[in-house]
């Protein structure tokens, strides 16, 4: 069990998963009935239907963190 009930959703500022695109990002807000998410390594936001937002698994989190670290390394930061 992940500690979340079946009706809860990540909040603004939380790491979340777009299940339709199999992408993890930060939940930035809502606009026009859709969530806005941004990649963990920065970049352009994308829109997500509310039913496609879920909590990321531990594996999803690790993949997102590694991607962000790799991007920072490539940028020399």
Image (cartoon, rainbow, N blue to C red):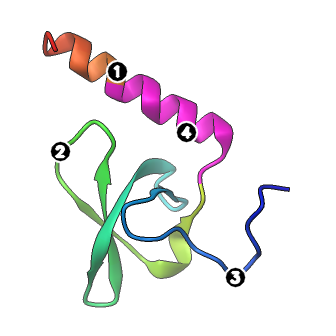
* Label 1 to label 4: alpha-carbon separation: 12 Å
Q: Residues within 10 Å of mark 1 (few under 14, many from 20)?
A: some
SS for tag 4? helix
Give the residue drawn at x 53%, y 71%: 52
Magenta-drawn stretch contains 2:
no
40 left or right, relative to 59: left
61 left or right, relative to 77: right
* Label 1 to label 3: alpha-carbon separation: 32 Å
Which residue has dot 1 on it?
A: 69
* Label 3 to label 4: alpha-carbon separation: 21 Å
Give the residue drawn at x 25%, y 90%: 32
Which residue has dot 3 on it?
A: 7
Q: Position of residue 66 (x, y in %)?
A: 44, 23
Which residue has dot 2 on it?
A: 43
The answer to which of marks 1 and 3 sits earlier in the sequence is: 3
Q: Nearer the viewer, mark 3 or mark 2?
A: 3
Residues 19 and 37: in front is 37
Position of the C terminus by quadrant: top left
Which residue has dot 4 on it?
A: 61
The answer to which of marks 4 and 2 sits earlier in the sequence is: 2
SS for tag 1? helix
Assess whether mark 4 and mark 3 are in contact (beta carbons under 8 angstroms): no
Q: Identify the magenta region.
A: 56-68
The answer to which of marks 3 and 4 sits earlier in the sequence is: 3
The answer to which of marks 3 and 2 sits earlier in the sequence is: 3
Position of the N terminus by quadrant: bottom right
């Amino acid at each position: 069990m992940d500690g979340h009930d079946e009706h809860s959703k990540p909040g603004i500022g939380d790491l979340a998963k777009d299940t339709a695109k199999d992408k993890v990002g930060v939940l930035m807000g809502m606009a026009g009935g859709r969530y806005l998410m941004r990649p963990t390594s920065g970049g352009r936001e994308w829109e997500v239907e509310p039913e496609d937002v879920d909590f990321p698994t531990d594996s999803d989190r690790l993949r997102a963190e590694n991607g962000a670290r790799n991007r920072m390394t490539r940028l020399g930061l």
